[in-house]
Amino acid sequence: MLVGRGARYAPEEGLQLVEAAAERDDTAALQLLAVLSALGAGRPYSWGEAVRLVARAAELGDVQAQGQMRLLGDPATFDLAEWFGAAEAQQLCQAPRVLTITNFFPKPACDWIIERARPRLEAARVNNPTTGGSSIEYNRSNTGAGFSVLDSDLILELANARVAATIQIARQNQEPANVLHYDPGQEFQAHFDYIDPAEPHFTDLVRQQGQRVATALIYLNDDFEGGETAFPRLNWSFKGKAGDALIFWNTAVNGALEKGSLHAGLPPTRGEKWIYSKWVRDRAWPLV
Ligand SMILES: O=C(O)CCC(=O)C(=O)O
């Protein structure tokens, strides 16, 4: 492995090897460099360059890159602002801060994310205060797929960039994305997304990794019944149309934990639910 956890190389060395592979028209290397360009990680921040690199991989016949290019359009006219076009935000609540946003992300791009996640689904895990690690627990029966930078692509990065621009917190503070999937009857029971520093195993984690201050959810489909995101303490629930977003803060501006952010992914009663979930920290999260 050239980069990432367990890599045998220092990051700069790994990056040089990826760049050399891209020079030799390795399509996976081209697409990894595209993601790094979109992030400005180890390379200058440039969406134009990112799209050009994926276009090159597409020309070389890479199916994944060709799929991305169908959504991204002509690299010569690619315009980030078009992706971040008109969206209507509504502030539902001040404490905790809760926003809903219609047309946050285009439907074809939502379908792309679903198809990327489908073959990677695994039992979803929760942070376990007893061990400090994560585990499969009775209160979460849905499945999910995680996407680190190494698994990412430009469509996922557009979603991440849009979240960052909306909440005005740097993309670097985002944990890897999770695409959540619920079959009928599956659920994520009421929980908080903040990490409670009062839990002995979490005290050090919060000190080292920072607090999870905000959560952004993008509804990827809407052809299901039930399955709302419910906030029992606010007496309120939300079910978006495909492409709509729900964003809420788990901490107040002064850092206090927002007890009103208690929320649940209710079970769909018919059809499958797919949702894109982003947890955002108060400091940079390691890239991979
Ligand atoms: O699926 C949902 O509606 C809620 C997801 C959720 O609770 C989370 O990602 O923290």
Image (cartoon, rainbow, N blue to C red):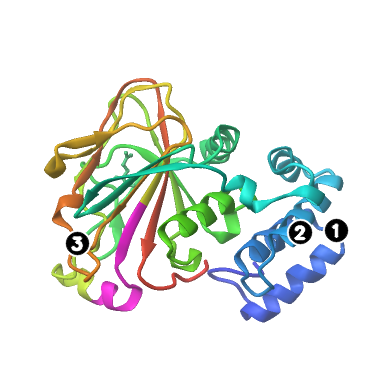
Residue that numbered label 2 is attached to: 30
| Residue at 79%, 56% in the rendered image | 52
Is 186 or 232 nearer to us in this picture? 232
Q: Do the residues labelled 1 and 2 touch (CB within 8 Å)?
A: yes
**Residue 30: x percent and y percent?**
76, 59
Q: In which quarter of the image is the N terminus?
A: bottom right
Specify whether residue 9 is in view: no
| Crowdedness near tag 1: few (<14), some (14–19) or many (≥20) residues, C-alpha within 10 Å | some
Mark nearer the viewer, 3 or 2: 2
The mark that comes first in sequence, 3 or 2, is 2
Residue that numbered label 3 is attached to: 129
* Amino acid at pointer 3: Pro
| Crowdedness near tag 3: few (<14), some (14–19) or many (≥20) residues, C-alpha within 10 Å | some
Residue that numbered label 1 is attached to: 25
Q: In 3D space, how far apart are the residues under numbered discs 3 and 2 (Cα atoms)?
A: 40 Å
* Amino acid at pointer 2: Leu
The mark that comes first in sequence, 1 or 2, is 1
Give the residues in magenta: 204-215
**Residue 233: x percent and y percent?**
12, 44
Q: In 3D space, how far apart are the residues under numbered discs 1 and 2 (Cα atoms)?
A: 7 Å
